[in-house]
Structure formats: structure tokens, C-alpha cells
Image: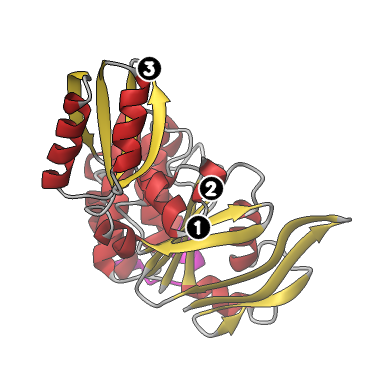
Amino acid sequence: MIQTQNLVKRYGREFAVNQLNLTVRQGTVFGIVGENGAGKTTTLSMLATLTVPTSGQAFIAGYEVTHQPHEVRRAIGYMPDSFGVYDELTVMEYLRFYADCYGVDRGTAERRAKELLEWVDLGAKQHSYVNALSRGMQQRLEIARCLMHDPEVLILDEPSSGLDPRSRLEMRAVLQRLRSLGKTILISSHILHELGSIADEIGIMRGGELSAIASVNVMLAHSDAFRTLWISGTGPREAWERAFADDPHVLNVVEKRPAVEVLYAGTVEQQAQLMKSLMDRGVVLYQFAERPTDIEELFLRLTDQGEEAD
């Protein structure tokens, strides 16, 4: 549904996007994660036909973005990372305006606008002015706007950017509902765990290149294999080191005073053996608890980036 082939965007000698090869299967959600300046926005802007690639090709719903931009625009709903609003339009007028732009007939537009506003929890705001809405409400309105012409593909550039914690949770709930629509979604963020409950696949973008890709299902399937133990206590340092060295299930130990964080690949029973090994060596334990393994840590291990993280 979305495919790029050696896609490049260069400004002078600087590469904003360099030889990008990406495939997003129909009906799936692909998340791109990267720091500011990694090339996420440039990539999405090229796919939305707003930025012309320097070289390479990109296809959406079978249409090539450079040579068939009008067809691509009808196939996508695009939400930029920043957008303007219309001061003198109400929420309903705003959605009707965009429906007119896409040639949606008035009856369908009216019905769809009301349904979408309920869907993004803005049903009570249909007569409010757009510029009077909070940032979080405006972001959710943009999701509704993207869906007004019922596109096959959604391209969302950091939809949770600039939101307070409550608004971020509300946006995440809306994004999770999008999965039920069966649309193909490409979404960017600079925070990996934000996409963990939304995406089917996640890619890391660095310096304009897609450096790693992993399936969220694979990460979740491995979540039981990798456990994070939080252990605190007192005892000789060599006792701690020997207990960890003798246990083959200990993958990594990070000292985080007043405790140590242990990445562990064993069962609950094997954890009990590690606890016994520590106590047999004279360690007095204050805490021995399991914590959920962070999705970033799993991603780095599953994409062979663990050594860099360590």
C-alpha cells in the first residue's frame, strides 16, 4: 500500500532522507520513531506530495507520488506536525469546508462529520469555533478532518506533539480506535513507547535513514523471555558479582543506586534460584521485584542495537 524505493531528499550537500526503502502493508500501522531532525517529517511530506524527492520513487495505493500527485492526495488523509486553523469557522463548518475540497456531497459530508465528531469525542463541540478549542481538541479534530473523504491511507506526523498528559492519553485512545477501521496508517513520533500499543511494525530513523525495523508482535512475544529485575540489599560486592556471573540467565546488570537493574531471561523459578544464590553468599535483600521490560530495551535487543545502548 505504501512503498518507497531508494527515496532521497537532499538540500545542497545535506541529506534529509537518504536511500529510504520502506514497505507498509495494506491495513497495517507502521510507526516511524526518531529524534527531531531525523528525517521523519520530510519523509511524510514527500509521501503526501508536498515535498518533491531529489531522487527515488514512492508509491501509495498504486500511484507514484511525483507523477500522480492528484491521485495520491485523494487516496490519503494527511495530518502535518503543525497546521493552521480558520478563526471564523465552527467545527462543523471546518469539516464541511474540507469535504467540499474533496468533492464529498453535502448529505454525505453532514452525516460523516457528525459521526466522526462523536468518534473523536467532539460531538458536543460541533458549534464551537475551531480557534477556541484546546490544542488536544484541535488535534482530534484534525483526525476527523483526515477521514472526511474516507481515504485508504492515513499519514500522521506526530499527532501527540505538544499535548499535555491528559490530552496525550485521549489522542492515544483515538489512534487505537483507528486500527479498527482497517486503514493503512503511517505515523511518526519521537517517543517509541507511544507507538507500542498502536503500531504493527516500528522503524527507527536516524540521520535520514531507516536504521532498524521490528514487529511489535515479535517484541510482545519476547516480553516473557526478557524480564527486568530490580534488586536492592547489602553485602560484599564480590558476592553480588559472583551470583550474577554464575547465573546464565543474567543478560545485563546496570547499577542504579540504591539498587541494581538486571535484564533476566529466566523463569520465575529461576529467579528464585538467583535470589537464593545471593542470600547464600551473604547478601541481605531489601527488594527483589520484577518490572515490565521497557519496549525501547526490547527493540534495541531485537534489532541488534543493544551494544550501542549499553
Q: Position of residue 89 (x, y in %)?
A: 45, 42
Number of labels in the image equals 3
Q: Report if the CB atoms under discs 2 and 1 are less than 8 Å apart.
A: yes
Circles 2 and 3: CB distance less than 8 Å? no
Within-10-Å neighbours for mark 3: few <14, some 14–19, many 20+:
few
Q: Give the crowd class for mark 2: few <14, some 14-19, many >=20 residues within 10 Å.
A: few
**Mark-to-mark CA distance, 2 and 1:** 7 Å
Q: Quadrant of residue 288?
A: top left
- Secondary structure state at the residue bearing disc 3: loop
Q: Which residue is mark 1?
A: 304
Question: Residue at horizontal 28%, vertical 43%?
Answer: 247
Which amino acid type corresponds to the residue marked 1 in the rendered image? Asp
Q: Is residue 20 left or right of residue 119?
A: right
Give the numbered dot on residue 117: none
**Can the viewer see residue 94 in this picture?**
yes
Q: Residue 269 location in percent, x, y?
A: 11, 45
Provide the residue span drawn in magenta. 98-107
Instruction: Say whether residue 219 is left or right of residue 202.
Output: left
**Residue 290 percent location from the top left of the image:** 20, 35
Dot placed on the residue nearer the N-terminal end, 1 or 3? 3
Between residue 98 and residue 245, name the one nearer to us.
245
Q: Which residue is mark 3?
A: 257
Residue 103 belongs to magenta span: yes
- Apparent side of residue 228 relative to residue 72 in the rendered image (left or right): left
User: Badge 2 is on which residue?
Assistant: 307
Main secondary structure along the magenta-highlighted residues: helix
Three-letter residue code for mark 3 = Arg
Residue 22 magenta-highlighted: no
In the image, residue 256 above or below residue 267: above
Residue 218, by quadrant, is bottom left
For marks 2 and 3 on the same chain, the one whose residue lies earlier in the sequence? 3
Q: For numbered disc 2, what is the local secondary structure?
A: helix
